[in-house]
Amino acid sequence: MNDDSLRDFRKPRRQAGGKPPKITFPCDYSLKVVGDAADDFAATVCQIVIRHDPSFDAAAIQVVPSRQGRYLSVRLTIRATGEAQLKALFDDLKATGRVHMVV
């Protein structure tokens, strides 16, 4: 899998007038991380997230299998402190080679 096959859905969409929506940091930021179904996928995602948000509560995640069981989505909320933190988190998730999408 190459980096071009992953899309960064965190990039703001342009609103009327051409201005991206504003996010005021710090804030709670919800993510859904999708990857191939495996017993350790959620744990791997949590280990990466904790590096970027030490206050992250892994007990609050939701793990949802796809209809046919091929994929898992890990739904979580972090305390986002800035765009640099979000970019670094996204890059680390992509670097695993196991994450197909972050929404």
Image (cartoon, rainbow, N blue to C red):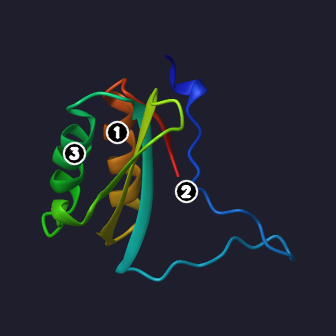
- Determine the image quadrant of residue 28: bottom left
Which residue is depicted at the point 46% across and 26% down?
70
| Direction from residue 53 to residue 7 in the image, left or right | right
Residue bearing mark 1: 93
Q: Say what amino acid the circle numbered 3 marks.
A: Ile
Q: Which mark is residue 48?
A: 3
Mark 3 surroundings: few (<14), some (14-19) or many (≥20) residues within 10 A: some
Q: Nearer the viewer, residue 67 or 80?
A: 67
Residue 90, compared with residue 6, is above or below; it is: below
Q: Say what amino acid the circle numbered 2 marks.
A: Arg
Q: Secondary structure at mark 2?
A: loop
Residue 98, compared with residue 82, is above or below; it is: above
Q: Nearer the viewer, residue 15 or 69?
A: 69
Which residue is depicted at the point 55% across and 32% down?
6
Which residue is depicted at the point 51% across and 18% down?
2
Which residue is depicted at the point 51% across and 26% down?
3
What percent of the width, then of the height, locates residue 39?
22, 31
Q: Which mark is residue 10?
A: 2
Q: Say what amino acid the circle numbered 1 marks.
A: Leu
Q: Mark 2 or mark 1: which comes first in sequence?
A: 2
Of all residues, the one furthest to the front in this rendering is 68
| Direction from residue 70 to residue 91 in the image, left or right | left
What percent of the width, then of the height, locates residue 99?
41, 33
- Determine the image quadrant of residue 61: bottom left
Q: Mark 2 or mark 3: which comes first in sequence?
A: 2
**Marks 3 and 1 in Cβ contact (< 8 Å):** yes
Q: In whole angstroms, how far apart are the C-alphas of marks 2 and 1?
A: 13 Å
